[in-house]
Each structure stands twice: as structure tokens, then as C-alpha cells.
Image (cartoon, helix red, strand yellow):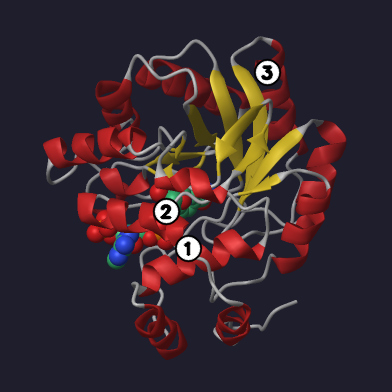
Amino acid sequence: MSSIDQVGTFSLGDRRVKRLGYGAMQLAGPGVFGPPRDRDAALAVLREAVARGVDHIDTSDFYGPHITNQLIREALHPYRKDLTLVTKVGARRGADGSWIPAFSREELTQAVHDNLRNLGLEALDVVNLRSMLSVHHPAEGSLEAPLRVLADLQKQGLIRHIGLSNVTRTQVAAGRQLCNIVCVQNQYNLAHREDDALIDELARDGIAYVPFFPLGGFTPLQSSTLSDVAARLQVTPMQVALAWLLRRSPNILLIPGTSSLTHLRENLAAAELTLPGDVMTALDTVADIGPA
Ligand SMILES: NC(=O)c1ccc[n+]([C@@H]2O[C@H](COP(=O)([O-])OP(=O)(O)OC[C@H]3O[C@@H](n4cnc5c(N)ncnc54)[C@H](OP(=O)(O)O)[C@@H]3O)[C@@H](O)[C@H]2O)c1
């Protein structure tokens, strides 16, 4: 039994995955573009994650582009039967590394085939439709047309399950009318709690919520309260941030990203940390908008 078994599991479609997984975005080069600075280190992080019991890896073919998926394939193929790879489509990269919406039927179909080829799979476990109505934040607007494309690809057997990313509550509700949504992947962490109500709603319905930027992403979380709590518990602030998310709701699946073996081990060790009630109350004050 590895230490991450302690945090339990939650369903992701017809699979159950451990609540502490790994996000592969940091493995590409600077700006999630081009090859990693240290290829061998990137492969080592992936192998170590799985060796330590990680059974849920988040990726996309637009990381690199293509490079992160190729690293996953090189490091881990043939995949363990219990490994769930979750990818996302809806964007492509410009020659300058820019993020460009790619929502047409042709682009989405191409993206699914690119993921299949680069990951070396015949079907993708879970594909998140990543809304690009606004690049950095959820924005209202219909996602019906691209969701119907993914549903068609699901009928063809290329996709097992569909999720949504960077979306509003309205879009989640509308998406659930169109097809079975197994997870929602939005930005959420100690300091960004806009999705509090959505998380609780999804938990009631058994749908996974997968926060991206759990550690703050490109601007790692910084808070004196967080640092004080970490010092008191003799752990790191990032471990506290992850433990807080694990305690926040049972449907939260973590995918912290790192290109560092040291950080990977530290993040997985957050499974051993249980936050007392008074610490949870103190951490609630870190949020920009306050708890729901
Ligand atoms: N759906 C979407 O739109 C979307 C957007 C962004 C990300 N994602 C997914 O979400 C995953 C997680 O997000 P993320 O990787 O961007 O952000 P994150 O997990 O919040 O943080 C990653 C950053 O924190 C650093 N870090 C990681 N562990 C650390 C530790 N123990 N101590 C100090 N620093 C640490 C990493 O640097 P080092 O590499 O140096 O450790 C990196 O700079 C991604 O990997 C990706 O799969 C999805």
C-alpha cells in the first residue's frame, strides 16, 4: 500500500481513481511550449509518480504541443491497467506558443486522433472539452456544437467518457442535458474559490471535480496564513494547500503539476497530512471571496 492510498478514491466514469494524481503540463518546455529543459528528468517524474501509486494523470496534446503526450508514452507505455489518462481538447498552439481556440468538428476530431496517436491508445479514457470562449477564465456561451462532436466520437468508440473544463455552472448544467459528464476541471485552490457551490452540486451527483492550478499554477500560492499553518504543522505550504483541497470535498481529485522529483514526492506525501478543524477555519480566510 502506498501513502496515497490513504486519501481514498472517487469515480471517474466507470473507473475509480485515487484522489491524489498528477498533472503533466509542467513537463513541456517554458510556457508549456517545446521540449523540456531536462528530458530524462521529465521521464523520471512520470515513472516515479506511477511507481508511488498514482493512477490518474492529466494531460493534453496541446502541451508542447504533442511533447507531453509523447513523454507519457515513452515513460509509461504499455500502460498499467489501473492507470487512467485524462486529456483535453479545444485549443491548438500557434507557432509563437499562443493558445488558439480549436472548436470546429475537424479540429476536435484531429485533436482526438493526435491524442490517440501520441499516447499510443485505441480509445481515450476521459476527454475534457476545454472551453476557449475566453482563454483564461470561464465565459458564458453555448458549448453544444463541440459537445455533440465529442459525443459522436464517443459513439465511434474513440472516447470513453466526456468532461468539461474552464466552464460556468450554466454550461455544466447544459452539458449534462446533452451527454454524460463525468468530471469538471476548473481553476480552484485555497485562494480562488469561485466554484464552491458548483463543487458541492457535483459532489451530490457523484461527479468528479478536478481543480487546475491547485498550487496556484504559474503564480504559486502565497499567504502568511498558509505559511503559518505549515510551520505549525511542520510541513510545507504546498502540502497544506493540497491537504485542504482533499478535505474540502470528497469528489475533488488532485492533479498537482511538477517537473521536479522532489516536488512530486512532497506533493504525494500530502496524503499523510490531516488538517485539524481549526486549521480548516483559519485557511478559509485565505480566499479572495470567502467561503460559500
Ligand atoms: N484545464 C485547464 O485549462 C488547465 C489549465 C492549467 C493546468 N491544467 C492541468 O492542471 C495541472 C495542475 O496545474 P499546474 O501544473 O499548472 O499548476 P499547479 O499544480 O498549481 O502548480 C504547478 C507549479 O507549482 C510548482 N510546484 C509544484 N509542486 C511544488 C512544490 N511541492 N513546492 C513548490 N512548488 C511546486 C511547479 O514548479 P516545479 O515544476 O518546479 O515543481 C509549477 O510551477 C496541470 O499539470 C494540467 O494537467 C489544466
Q: Is residue 201 left or right of residue 221?
A: right
Classify the position of the C terminus by image quarter.
bottom right
Classify the position of the N terminus by image quarter.
top left
Q: Which residue is mark 2?
A: 256
Amino acid marked by disc 2: Pro
From the viewer's perspective, is the residue at label 2 or at label 3 nearer?
Answer: 2
Q: Is residue 9 left or right of residue 78?
A: right
- Kindly check if marks 2 and 1 are in contact, taking CB atoms under 8 A apart as contact: yes
Q: Of callouts 2 and 1, which one flags the residue occurring earlier in the amino acid sequence?
A: 1
On the question of residue 99 being in view, the answer is no
SS class of the residue under badge 2?
A: loop
> What percent of the width, then of the height, locates residue 203?
76, 52
Q: Of callouts 1 and 3, which one flags the residue occurring earlier in the amino acid sequence?
A: 3
- Kindly check if marks 1 and 3 are in contact, taking CB atoms under 8 A apart as contact: no
Q: Is residue 87 left or right of residue 64?
A: right
Q: What residue is drawn where x is 33% and y is 39%?
A: 49
Amino acid marked by disc 1: Leu
Q: Of callouts 2 and 3, which one flags the residue occurring earlier in the amino acid sequence?
A: 3
Amino acid marked by disc 3: Gln
Answer above or below: position of 154 versus 71.
Answer: above
Q: Quadrant of residue 125?
A: top right
SS class of the residue under badge 1?
A: helix
Q: What residue is drawn where x is 53% and y is 35%?
A: 89
SS class of the residue under badge 3?
A: helix
Quarter of the rendered image showing ligand 1: bottom left
Q: Which residue is mark 1?
A: 242
| Residue 154, disc | 3
Disc 2 under 8 Å from ligand 1? The reply is yes
On the question of residue 28 being in view, the answer is yes
Q: What residue is drawn where x is 63% and y is 72%?
A: 193
State the residue lying farthest toward the front: 1
Number of marks in the rendered image? 3
